[in-house]
């Protein structure tokens, strides 16, 4: 078995799932967000330390305003329903991404969830919101420049990223059938195992998650060395 501390997920396919059923794309986002609870609870049972979920990318602002508005309302709906339970189970909420550019209401909801759960230690549920890896790298670089550094080590750079205190990603799962990274965690995925699943995110259940982990456990991770 490979050590599995950090799972990153690209929760893709919500819109296509809804469209297939003649429903509005936002219906897909609704069921997709309910599925976050399922997968978080499964990760908790499995003893994973961190799950980082791609919730909204820096490129997703290109979508119709109506869809963006719904996606920005979803955290409030999600946490109203599930924060108490997640908190009681010892799950700590965190965020990565540039939250300064999301609507204030959404930001407050996220900040509140982070604050309420800050002492929890069982699982970090990390939401990537207005997250883009290139944006993160540029922000990190600017913060290093502001600190007056003229040359940096990998460690300095790692410490300037939004993920600074998190372990490297071990396993990336992308649902929805596409095989690309879409500007997600480019630095942090350097040695991650990649698993692409055809199923759309709202259909991706606990058993499917376990199958991805089984797949991960079959991989021989060499990190450039020999075994
Ligand atoms: C992923 O599902 C969720 C977000 C990007 C917010 P999509 O909305 O991208 O669904 P598809 O890929 O269009 O089916
Ligand atoms: C990636 O999905 C972003 C999220 C899941 C939030 P997209 O649907 O935005 O990715 P592309 O556009 O198909 O690459
Ligand atoms: Mg998509």
Image (cartoon, grey):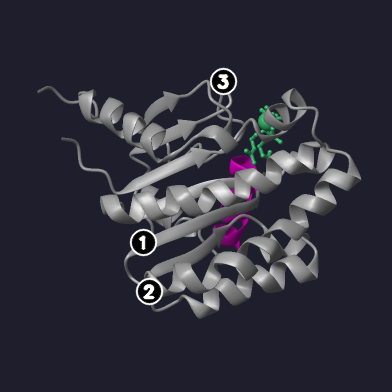
Instruction: Look at mark 2 in the image and give the residue it sits on.
Output: 120
Answer with left or right where residue 93 lies relative to residue 25.
left
Magenta stretch, main secondary structure class = helix
Give above or below for 195 relative to 97: above
Q: Secondary structure at mark 3?
A: loop
Any mark on residue 29, and which? Answer: none
Q: Secondary structure at mark 2?
A: loop
Any mark on residue 177, and which? Answer: 3
Picture quadrant of residue 102:
bottom right
Furthest residue toward front: 21
Give above or below for 45 relative to 178: below
Residue under the image location 74 percent in, 27 percent down: 21
Q: Position of residue 16 (x, y in %)?
A: 71, 26
Q: Are marks 2 and 1 in contact (CB under 8 Å)?
A: yes
Q: Are marks 3 and 2 in contact (CB under 8 Å)?
A: no
Q: Are marks 3 and 1 in contact (CB under 8 Å)?
A: no
Q: Is mark 2 within 8 Å of ligand 2?
A: no
Q: CA distance from mark 3 to mark 1?
A: 27 Å
Furthest residue toward left: 227
Q: Quadrant of ligand 1?
A: top right
Which of these two is toward me, 35 or 104?
35
Indicate whether residue 63 is drawn in magenta.
no
Instruction: Look at mark 1 in the image and give the residue it sits on.
Output: 123
Q: Position of residue 35 (x, y in %)?
A: 54, 46
Which stretch is magenta?
131-146
Q: Position of residue 204 (x, y in %)?
A: 50, 34
Answer with left or right where residue 128 lies relative to residue 218.
right
Residue under the image location 79 percent in, 70 percent down: 104
Within 10 Å of disc 2 (Cα), the crowding (few <14, some 14-19, many 20+) is some
């Amino acid at each position: 078995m490979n050590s599995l501390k950090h799972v990153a997920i690209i929760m893709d396919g919500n819109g296509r799932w809804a469209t297939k059923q003649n429903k509005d794309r936002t219906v897909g986002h609704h069921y997709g967000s309910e599925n976050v609870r399922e997968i978080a609870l499964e990760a908790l049972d499995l003893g994973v330390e961190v799950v980082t979920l791609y919730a909204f990318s820096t490129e997703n602002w290109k979508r119709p305003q109506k869809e963006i508005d719904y996606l920005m309302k979803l955290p409030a709906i999600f946490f109203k329903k599930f924060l108490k339970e997640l908190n009681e189970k010892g799950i700590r909420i965190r965020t990565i991404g540039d939250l300064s550019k999301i609507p204030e209401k959404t930001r407050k909801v996220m900040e509140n969830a982070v604050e309420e759960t800050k002492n929890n230690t069982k699982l970090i549920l990390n939401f990537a919101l207005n997250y883009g890896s290139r944006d993160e790298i540029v922000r990190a670089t600017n913060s290093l420049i502001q600190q007056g550094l003229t040359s940096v080590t990998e460690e300095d750079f790692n410490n300037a990223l939004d993920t600074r205190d998190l372990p490297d990603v071990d396993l990336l799962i992308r649902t929805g059938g596409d095989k690309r990274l879409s500007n997600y965690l480019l630095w942090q995925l350097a040695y991650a195992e990649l698993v692409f699943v055809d199923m759309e995110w709202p259909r991706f259940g606990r058993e499917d998650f376990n199958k991805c982990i089984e797949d991960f456990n079959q991989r021989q991770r060499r990190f450039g060395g020999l075994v």
